[in-house]
Amino acid sequence: MTGVEPEVSQRAGSETDRGPLGRIIGWLYVIGGGIGLAAAAALLLEKITSLEDTGYVPSCDISPILSCGSVMVTPQAEAFGFPNPIIGVAGFAVLVTVGMVLLTGFRPPRWFWLGLQLGTTFGVVFIHWLIYQSLYEIGALCPYCMVVWAVTIPIFWYTTLHNLERGHFSSGGAGTVGSALVRFHSVALVVWFLVIVVLILQRFWTYWSGLF
Amino acid sequence: MTNITITIVVVLVAVGVIGGVLLFGGNGNSTSGSAVPAEVLRNEKSHTLSEAEDDKVTVVEFLDFQCPACAQYYQQAMKGIEEDYQGKINLVPRNFPVENIHPLAMPAARAAEAAGIQGKYTEMYHQIMDNYQSWAVAEDGQNVNSNVEQGEQAFEGFAKEIGLDMAKYRKDLESDQVTEQIEKDQEDAQEAGVEGTPTIFINGEQFEPGQGGDVAQQLRGKIDEALNE
């Protein structure tokens, strides 16, 4: 054993480009984060404009069901006492920056990935609470919010799989379930999206079927 | 099979099933696309803002007095339609208060129904809708007002304004008659497939605004179409 081997082994054990996820996660953060940032910023601008002009009709008020205006005035739109899009603007801006840094080849340490896991887990839990509120309490869908939902789920999903694949959650690696999830990563994601699509269709069936 | 192959198969099957159900599966227990029976949309106790002798066109609006979209519809479409089509169409407002997000929707509905007992539903309806900003919106000018006491005081002011017998109004506010009227509206709304407010039916057909454009123009177009049939 030479003095070089442990260093190589340690590097390989922490971060290399092995597996498909290492290659896509940087791009996912940049593209998904960018889309989420644009949607959150648009929603924030709509909120500011409606504060300036109480008679303003948001551009995303398409129908009684597809309406930002109906959602923006509810208490759920300010879950922490300030407009939710502020969280999106801050969070997605961070993700875009992280994505760009990852694309330069930077390999963050484990604590950094666990921090991303914490942030994206908060995001995914929060948007599922908002999905429930939108469907079953408010009874309206905010188009910009749905864009945020659509990007938050894959960002959380691939961050989790990346951490599983790299063994960031424990020293034992991904494990059997983790390996299966990594192997069929997009199947699980599509099924996740389908469940939400079906819930939206079922909740507002009258509206959707009326469009055809 | 690989991940990509299974994903593509799942997506194709889902698109096929959902698309097929949307295109060919009918409307389940909903009523969109087929006329809702007239007796569900209007009964002998329903109020009217306009009445047509020929009963050729009946427009029914399920509304929530505190819903911002209903207030917008009122200002941009319904108020003008009521004036311009007075005597030409039946215009029937019905209650669908969404209490969990609009805390003053039910008190407003009760105030309107209590005024209706004294034959002044229309006057109270207009007071409530014309003064929406004063009672429905919180002090920050943005969120809906959740101060029920403040709302009830505003409705009492409207009741005095339109000359109601105040003792009777206060008694009627809590009456079973008012409760039953609102519950009947809610039951009928459910049967008609109403899921949000405002939901408007023109001769039993649910009005669905097209994307973009002026909702008032679209609504008037549909009414004119029905009048000219």
Image (tube, coloured by chain):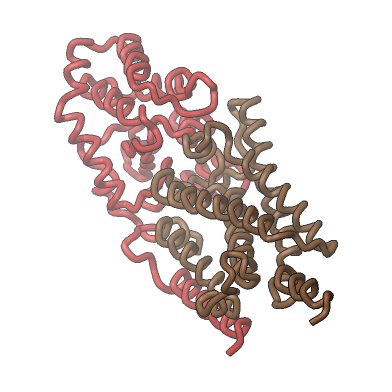
* Residue nearest the viewer, comparing A154 with A211: A154
Give coordinates of residue A60: x percent, y percent.
Answer: 61, 45
User: A2 or B212: nearer the eye?
Assistant: A2
At 31% from the left and 36% from the top, the residue drawn is B95
Residue A164 point in image, percent of width and height: 59, 69
Answer yes or no: is residue B9 visible: yes
Does residue A131 lie above or below A69 as drawn? below
- Residue A40: image x %, image y %? 65, 45
Observer able to see residue B200: no
Q: Quadrant of residue A203?
A: bottom left
Q: Is residue A86 left or right of residue B60?
A: right
Residue at point 48%, 33% (across, down):
B68
Q: In the image, which lettered chain appears brown?
A: A
Name the image quarter holding residue B128.
top left
Side of A41 relative to B147 (left or right): right
Residue farthest toward the bottom in the current orientation of the protein: B1
Q: Residue at x 64, y 41 (%)?
A: A43
| Residue found 47% across the figure and 60% down from its top | A208
How many labels were placed on the picture? 0
Closer to the camera in the image, B95 or A155: A155
Q: Quadrant of the N terminus of chain A?
A: bottom right
**Eyeballing the image, is A104 above or below A173?**
above
Q: Observer-nearest residue: A167 or A54?
A: A167
Residue B30 image position (x, y, % from top left): 34, 59
Give me the chain that's red: B
Side of A131 where A7 appears, left or right? right
Q: Is residue A100 left or right of residue A91?
A: right
Tell me if residue B52 comes above or below residue B170 in the rendering.
below
